[in-house]
Amino acid sequence: MFGPLVTKPLASRNNKTGSWRMGLVPKFLKKNCIGCKMCALICPENCITGKEKNTFDYDPKYCKGCGNCAVICPKSDILMVKEEGKE
């Protein structure tokens, strides 16, 4: 179902990766969220937090902008958007 991960989970906790993202970040719409936690489970850096529906968000210091969360969301409630301040 999923391809192999290139890095070990939580690798960026030692090296903040937010500074080298490709310019995309997840935008949690918080409209159709059902609280399935798939976004948090698929995140290779464990930077998505939230306990119940419509409370999930990400930590920009560690997010790589990979888009896994947006792809896995069954309700399409996460979009990858251009990061503010990036060209």
Image: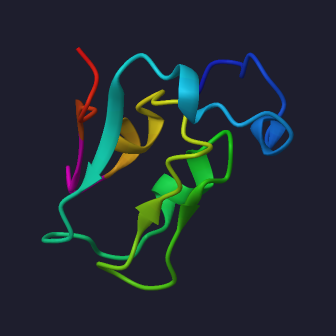
Asked whether residue 29 is in view, the answer is: yes
Residue 75 sits inside the magenta stretch: yes
Left or right of 2? Residue 69 is left
Indicate whether 79 appears above or below 15. Answer: below
At a point 40% along the width and 31% down the height, the residue shown is 67
- Quadrant containing the N terminus in the rendered view: top right
Q: Quadrant of residue 4?
A: top right
What residue span does the magenta drawing correspond to? Answer: 74-79
Q: Residue furthest left?
A: 31
Asked whether residue 1 is in view, the answer is: no
Residue 85 sits inside the magenta stretch: no
Left or right of 77? Residue 20 is right
At a point 79% along the width and 39% down the height, the residue shown is 9
Left or right of 75? Residue 71 is right
Give residue 58's position: percent from left, percent from top.
47, 57
> How many marks on residues?
0
Indicate whether 3 appears above or below 52. Answer: above
Left or right of 11? Residue 25 is left
The chief SS type of the magenta part is loop
Q: Nearer the viewer, residue 12 or 7?
A: 12
At a point 26% along the width and 30% down the height, the residue shown is 85
Q: Nearer the viewer, residue 36 or 53?
A: 53
Give residue 22's position: percent from left, percent from top.
42, 16
Q: Residue furthest bottom?
A: 52
Q: Nearer the viewer, residue 64 or 70?
A: 64
Q: Nearer the viewer, residue 41 or 56?
A: 56
Give residue 61's position: percent from left, percent from top.
58, 46
Give residue 84's position: percent from left, percent from top.
23, 35
